[in-house]
Every structure is written in structure tokens, then in C-alpha cells.
């Protein structure tokens, strides 16, 4: 190896190594942020597919309807939110709905900000205690043991 090659390596090696380390750290952070939580892994195992009341695609439709309900111009559309939960018939239905929701990004008019949150986080963050109690009452009335 001649002196010119050694000089080039000495010049470009540190930035390349630094960039590689930085990309690796970013990748680790991304994996951590996108990995399901331990709780999520646990409750996913509690979904009994034979106890689902609808096709899995319908839960995606329910999740989309909830997202639209949270993004209303004049606040949340509580009646539409309650309507989705009235259609839940089993614990597995609610868990499948949470799985279909995943972690969604939504915009709130009130705060003027975008959030990425689970369904539980959105419900407890967007609804009042009285509204959450009504959701829980609807679920309980349908024989569902899950509460928010």
C-alpha cells in the first residue's frame, strides 16, 4: 500500500465508521420504537379466533371508523365511538380491534399536533372520564370484561 492510499484511508475511515455507528444506533432505536410491547404480545395471545364475531378485515373498518371519529372538526364524535363499541360482542373482538388499530398517527384539532398512539392511549387521552365510563358500560353490558 503506497503512502497516498494510506492517507486516503486515514482521511475517510473515521467519517465512514462514525456514520456506520450512527446508522446502527438509529436502527436500534427504530426497532425499539416499533417493537410490540410485552403487554401487547401478551394480549395478542388472548385473542381466540373462534370467538371473533366478524372477519378480521371488519376490525380494520372499525379502527378506521374510530380514527375518523377522533379527527372530527368540532371534536370527537362520541356517538360514532360508542357505536363501534356496541358492536363488540366478546373480549376477543375488543382485543382484535386493538390489534387492528395498532399504533396510529392522528391529528387533534384541540392541540394542533400529530400523535402516534395505541387505541387505549387515544381513548384515555381524548375522551373524558364520563365518556370512558360510557364505553366501559357498553362493553360490560355486552358481557365483555375488558375496560379502558
Image (cartoon, helix red, strand yellow):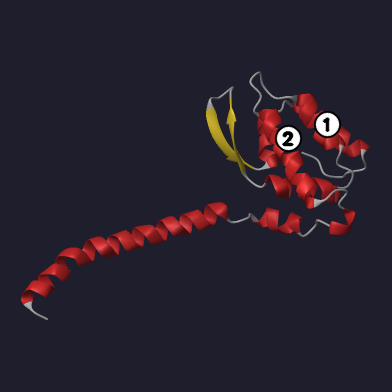
Q: CA distance from mark 2 to mark 1?
A: 10 Å
Disc 2 to disc 1: CB gap under 8 Å? yes
Q: Which residue is mark 2?
A: 65
Q: Is residue 84 left or right of residue 66?
A: right
Q: Quick one: SS at disc 2?
A: helix
Q: Is residue 142 left or right of residue 79?
A: right
39 or 111: nearer the viewer? 111
Could you tell me residue 55's position as x and y percent?
Answer: 82, 51
Return the residue found at the far bottom: 1
Q: Quadrant of the N terminus?
A: bottom left
The total number of labels drawn is: 2
Could you tell me residue 94's position as x and y percent?
Answer: 80, 45
Q: Residues within 10 Å of mark 2 (few under 14, many from 20)?
A: some
Tag in front: 2 or 1: 2
- The residue sitting at 58% across, 31% down in the picture is 107
Return the residue found at the far left: 3
Q: Which residue is mark 1?
A: 83
Q: Tell me which corner region of the image, top left, top right, bottom left or bottom right, holds residue 101.
A: top right
Amino acid at each position: 500500500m503506497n503512502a497516498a492510499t494510506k492517507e486516503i484511508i486515514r482521511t475517510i475511515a473515521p467519517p465512514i465508521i462514525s456514520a456506520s455507528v450512527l446508522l446502527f444506533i438509529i436502527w436500534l432505536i427504530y426497532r425499539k420504537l416499533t417493537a410490540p410491547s410485552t403487554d401487547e404480545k401478551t394480549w395478542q395471545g388472548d385473542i381466540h379466533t373462534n370467538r371473533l364475531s366478524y372477519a378480521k378485515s371488519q376490525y380494520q373498518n372499525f379502527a378506521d371508523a374510530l380514527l375518523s371519529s377522533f379527527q372530527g372538526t368540532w371534536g370527537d364524535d362520541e356517538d360514532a365511538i360508542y357505536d363501534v363499541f356496541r358492536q363488540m360482542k366478546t373480549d376477543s373482538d375488543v382485543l382484535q380491534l386493538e390489534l387492528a388499530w395498532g399504533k396510529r398517527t392522528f391529528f387533534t384539532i384541540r392541540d394542533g399536533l400529530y400523535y402516534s398512539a395505541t387505541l387505549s392511549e387515544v381513548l384515555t387521552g381524548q375522551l373524558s372520564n364520563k365518556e370512558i365510563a360510557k364505553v366501559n358500560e357498553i362493553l360490560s353490558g355486552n358481557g365483555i370484561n375488558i375496560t379502558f
